[in-house]
Image (cartoon, coloured by chain):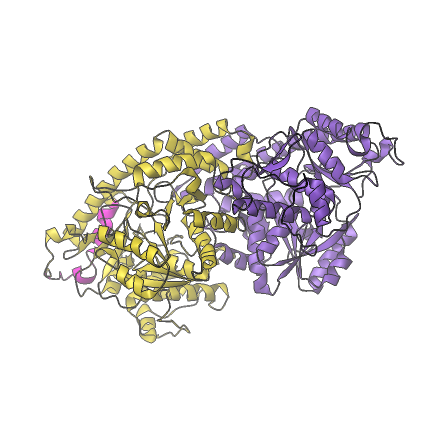
Chain colours: A purple, B yellow
Amino acid sequence: MSLQMALEVVRSSPDSLTSQIQRFIKEEIAAGVLHPGTRLPSSRRLAGDLDVSRSVVVEAYGQLVAEGYLEAAQGSGTRVVEHLSRQDTVVPTLLDEGWIPAVRWDLRTGARNTPAFPRQEWLACYQRALQAAGPESHAYPPLAGMGELRLELARYLGRVRGVRADPADLLVVSGFAQALGLLCGVLPQLGVTEVAVEDPGHPGQRQFVRESGLRPVPVPVDEEGIDVGALARTGVRAVVVTPAHQFPTGVGLSPERRAALVGWAREVDGWVVEDDYDGSLWYERGGRPLALQRLDPERVVYAGTASKTLAPGLRLGWVAAPPRLLGPLLRHRARHDLGTESLTQLAFAELLRSGLFDRHLRRLTALGRSRREALTEAVRRHLPGTTVLGVRAGLHAYLRLPPGTDEAEVVAGALRRSVLVRGGAGFHARWSWDAPALVVGHAHLPRSAITEAVRRLGSVGPWADPPASPRPGSSAASAGRRWS
Amino acid sequence: MSLQMALEVVRSSPDSLTSQIQRFIKEEIAAGVLHPGTRLPSSRRLAGDLDVSRSVVVEAYGQLVAEGYLEAAQGSGTRVVEHLSRQDTVVPTLLDEGWIPAVRWDLRTGARNTPAFPRQEWLACYQRALQAAGPESHAYPPLAGMGELRLELARYLGRVRGVRADPADLLVVSGFAQALGLLCGVLPQLGVTEVAVEDPGHPGQRQFVRESGLRPVPVPVDEEGIDVGALARTGVRAVVVTPAHQFPTGVGLSPERRAALVGWAREVDGWVVEDDYDGSLWYERGGRPLALQRLDPERVVYAGTASKTLAPGLRLGWVAAPPRLLGPLLRHRARHDLGTESLTQLAFAELLRSGLFDRHLRRLTALGRSRREALTEAVRRHLPGTTVLGVRAGLHAYLRLPPGTDEAEVVAGALRRSVLVRGGAGFHARWSWDAPALVVGHAHLPRSAITEAVRRLGSVGPWADPPASPRPGSSAASAGRRWS
């Protein structure tokens, strides 16, 4: 049966093809156009009809399955699920979460890819904060955040990330998404309507920028991080970067590029938004890169989050902003909400003040090192020819697959073996990706699960039976090689 | 010394004159145009220059003093404070809070006018929720709110407010401000760019609507609530109302008007936003008005908040929305934040589930009755000729002053006696108010403080020494009279 489906993709869109397909299918389901139980064309067929890589369709289907929109039954193809509540049809743009049927190993980055929440420490701090809270703590919180938290954050960010900021420069927000939303609301007031983003980068972030009414402009990333020359040629005046641990490639922005980026911002009277999403999680001894912001606090907006170190559910983030932006950001915020929940702010302030947060980070660091070892060892053993990148820090790794590997085949094969993993193609804004890769989130998995998931990957694609002969460069050493 | 100040007001603006003056002064201070220590003209002088009632200026100055922008020194007039941090210069538009120098009795409605937070009960519920929380509770919360809370809210709202909604119709938001912000973002997609608001009404709400890019259209309120005939004549297709306990007059929307309002909405294919800000606090036996929403859940958007019953600091509110609006609201929200903090939602769900919230409400009701008695008795004794309105419910009362009273003189005299209270004029969008009144928040004050504050009011304005002779209608009975 060769099913058809009315669907169009726009190659020039800043959205990846994968996310265009995903969004289209979601919207058609929400609109009642694609009815429950409807069978969809096979990924091979649809990819052919659209003239895109099969990997793109496989990944879109895989994610829609994971989010509960589609179901993939053995032998009977992919179909729209029978029971879908109204609520389920709207999904946050920056999220990857969702109910995961028949997927036992979820290697995606995003919502669930976070370490265990430090329940007892958090509760102790919440309790202390609540006991100490006077009536003013229960009133509307200051729009910029509770004074207690801004003080502790200024100390922490200076000490651990080298951020140059007074408490008065800080703005507590309900997660990085709100920070980005506020910036997208304020930048047009400064004459900025285009925002450069890293390519590859976070597809949800590109979409978020676009839906906020600005134009995202992808700029290539190489072994040293974002290409500042290419950035300058775009003519834009604002950019969002991940200097400590580029998402998803894991490279660090080189010292030369850092200087060039700040120089660019000064030259064009522009702004750099530093998304330091996982900068507090560093696994190597020494050499931890400090915040880019310290090079020029007047040009760099620093943004951090508790999502990677505590939990996304806390909806807690912070921004260190130059004075020229801080006022407009606060005024803009006053039109959207009236501040971030007080007690959560006070509990986090107490977690920082008491040193319990540092202790938690030390635990996370030890766990991260251990997961990194498990991953590197499993890749060396089961995925010969693959290079592991970006494991100096953070919660994910970037696996560069052997040249010529069919990325889509690996992703599809993995799903058949109950492993959900994303191919590199989904993170690219431009359809020019010829380096097959996988982006692997590992923070929520024990060592044994990482090992087993990678072992299963080792039976698909180029590693499938009959065993492929080892490719050039697939030495044990290459698994540890990094770009920077 | 007769100081001047460059300042203009727009009589046709939907903003009240008071809030225009306040905003102008704040902005000039923030911009560094009005320097620290600068003396300002007297309220009498400025009112004369602007050709407005002195009450308007007195109130604007009084609030700027309370918010820490200005200081009023005995004998040396009003001046800009010497030390104002950058953060202090941005104040949320819906708030009334702030540091209050030299004011011992703050009778304003708003941020601090809330009963004591039930610390032990909340902590117990937070702890239970945290103990029960699985990893999914720490992931990004569903945009519409945690399932546990939507279930408990649907039960509670049906039981206590007669709201007709399933959990799937509900959206948990970070306070009513966010609900209004989302609605203002979505209504233009439905062809609605003007929103009717009650007059008198919440000045911050009018401003919020305007800053969201929509035009607020004031519609008069009388003894039965909003004038639906006048509403129909405006030609708008959306309105925000407070049917249970109109803000600030305290009148209830009559059954006839309720039916007419819903009929209007159907006729014009329009929307009614029901701001049920204090509908859970009802002090009379029997006769509690149910939610307007139950008359037509397809046309009425119901919005509630925890700000009046628990604390504004929780930033917790909820919306029951018709299907036609719910999807757009969620999609719009995905561009601003990624949901409301999870653990706070789960703790509130547990507070509802356990019955502790109902117990808390019973306590609040007893306290509210007691405060009402104290206020009514003190007004009867110290403010002869004054009628107390709107004390069947909620956290504030509306005092209709004797005809001919100089409202501004009462407000200014009260401030000199360390009592900060708002005149009725500040709540009017149109400058046509000839009924002097005070709006008195009493939730945060013990009985003795209410009595003492009213006693002090009794020595200013028409009640100042030498004692004014009782005016017609100033019988003890009139203090208990109500409009509806």
Q: Which residues are magenta?
A: B449-469
Q: Quadrant of the N terminus of chain A?
A: top right
Q: Is residue B456 magenta?
A: yes
Measured from the top left, where is residue B283 in percent x and y?
23, 41
Q: Looking at the image, which is closer to me, A436 or B374?
A: A436
Q: Is residue A18 left or right of residue A315?
A: right
Q: Is residue A441 magenta?
A: no
Q: Is residue A134 left or right of residue A44?
A: left
Location of residue B447 (image quadrant): top left
**In the rendered image, is residue B355 in sight?**
yes
Measured from the top left, where is residue B113 in percent x and y?
33, 47
Q: Residue furthest right?
A: A472
Measured from the top left, where is residue A281 in percent x and y?
67, 38
Residue sitting at x 44%, y 53%: B183
Measured from the top left, where is residue A21 in percent x and y?
64, 47
Q: Is residue A363 left or right of residue B135?
A: right
Q: Quadrant of the C terminus of chain A?
A: top right
Q: Is residue B373 left or right of residue A424?
A: left
Location of residue B54 (image quadrant): bottom left
Q: Looking at the image, which is closer to me, B331 or A75?
A: A75
